[in-house]
Amino acid sequence: MAKNNTTTAVAAESVNRSELIRKYNADHPGTKHSDIAKALTVGNVTVSASLVSSVLGSKGKKRNGLDVESLKATAAFIKGCGNVNKAVEAIKAVGAFIDSVGSSEDALQSIEAYQSLAAAIK
């Protein structure tokens, strides 16, 4: 027997795609809009990345070419260092340290090992 396309279309329309997007985003924070769209596109329910962007907005995304969240984090880092020049020097020093040990994970392990050794020597 042939599938009833009218019933299928009504069922697909009755799904609140915006609510599905919000719930998926809440359950999977940090997921890219395109990945949310792929995950929610099943059966006759189609979700596009542009719909996801419309529903979730652009919080933390680039606005007029500026990544506002990155700028906020940068401002906080500079403030913590005292000024831009000190922040640049700190970044260069940390970058050189990470390069010398291989990766950021290796750098953290190295610091933890040093900390343990220093505590044992006391």
Image: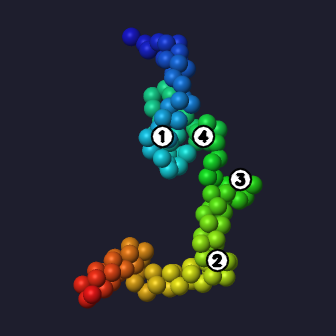
Q: Residues within 10 Å of mark 1 (few under 14, many from 20)?
A: few
Q: Which residue is mark 3?
A: 63
Quarter of image, res 118: bottom left
Which quarter of the figure is the C terminus placed in? bottom left
Q: Which residue is mark 1?
A: 26
Q: Which residue is mark 2?
A: 82
Q: Residue 73: horizontal and vertical position, in percent?
A: 60, 63
Q: Residues within 10 Å of mark 4 (few under 14, many from 20)?
A: some
CB-based contact (under 8 Å), mark 4 and mark 3: no
Between disc 4 and disc 1, whose residue precedes? 1
Marks 2 and 4 sit apart, C-alpha to C-alpha, by 35 Å
Between disc 3 and disc 1, whose residue precedes? 1
- At label 1, the amino acid type is Ala
Marks 2 and 1 sit apart, C-alpha to C-alpha, by 36 Å
Is 112 left or right of 44, judged from the image as shown? left
Is 6 left or right of 121, judged from the image as shown? right
Residue found 45% across the figure and 32% down from its top = 42
Q: Nearer the viewer, mark 2 or mark 1?
A: 2
- At label 2, the amino acid type is Gly
Q: Residues within 10 Å of mark 3 (few under 14, many from 20)?
A: few
Between disc 3 and disc 2, whose residue precedes? 3
Residue 119, placed above or below residue 104: below
